[in-house]
Amino acid sequence: MYELPSHYACTGCGKRFGFEFQRSVYYCGTTPLGHQLLDADVFPIPVRPGWCKTCDKLCVVEDIRPLRTFEDAYGAVRAGKNVEYPEGTLNYDLPEAIDRIAAYLRWRLGRAHTSRALCCGGINYQFLDVKQPLLKHAECDFGVVEAVYLYFGSYNGSGPGVYSPANIRVFNGEGDLIGLLTTRAWGGATLWEVVPAAYETSQSD
């Protein structure tokens, strides 16, 4: 899976720009989103770093690659190989890996909307993981906004949602915000509590 930078910073003045959130998931179930979800029913959203021109801030943007990429990933896992996109399968057994990549393939086949900035659902954004064009920092005469990567040691704690709400954003298959994963049970099949959520205004056009 693509690794996001820790944050971005201006090369001139040093101002730091952080992500409002990085982790988000799709729920593509056939029943309406309820008050609880199993971890197995949600799928991490592949994302890229971007600058939302509507919100004027750093954001994550859906990383939706061509259908052929999903077909190739499905073929690879069926052949017993690990893939990194659309989701890393190294920690899944083979039947579960096949099921999950098959679910992504079904999602991609039905996806109608172009990639969206997940801060507001808009499409007026600039990807930041490309060499050009550079993003000029409007408040600085000479600086541009560049990625900063910080590396931390491994973490063996309980993870998000056990001792405090995780508030992981849940999106439907077209990139609409529909809920938040808040707290979860620790141990066994992970069951999340869910609260409804939506974009403040529609930016889908």
Image (cartoon, rainbow, N blue to C red):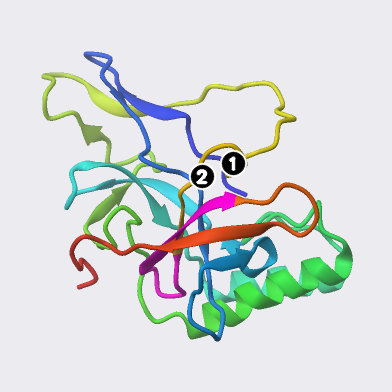
Q: Badge 1 is on which residue?
A: 160
Q: Quadrant of residue 96?
A: bottom right
Is 175 or 142 nearer to us in this picture?
175
Residue count near mark 2 (Cα–Cα under 10 Å), binned few <14, some 14–19, many ≥20 = some
Q: Is residue 163 above or below residue 123?
A: above
Amino acid type of the residue tagged 1 in the rendering: Pro
- Look at 31% across and 64% down and name the residue there: 198
Q: Nearer the viewer, residue 163 or 12?
A: 163
How far is disc 2 from disc 1 in space, using C-alphas?
5 Å
**How dense is the environment of label 1, judged by Cα within 10 Å: few (below 14), some, or many (20 and up)?**
some
Report x, y in % for residue 173.
Answer: 46, 75
Q: Position of residue 43 (x, y in %)?
A: 60, 63
Q: Which residue is mark 2?
A: 166
In front here: 184 or 105? 184
Q: Residue at x 44, y 72 (%)?
A: 172
* Residue at x 55%, y 86% (from the top left corner): 30
Report if residue 177 lies within the magenta region: yes
Residue 134 shown left or right of residue 26 in the figure: left
In the rendered structure, which segment of residues is drawn in magenta? 171-183
Please report contact status of discs 2 and 1: CB closer than 8 Å, yes or no: yes
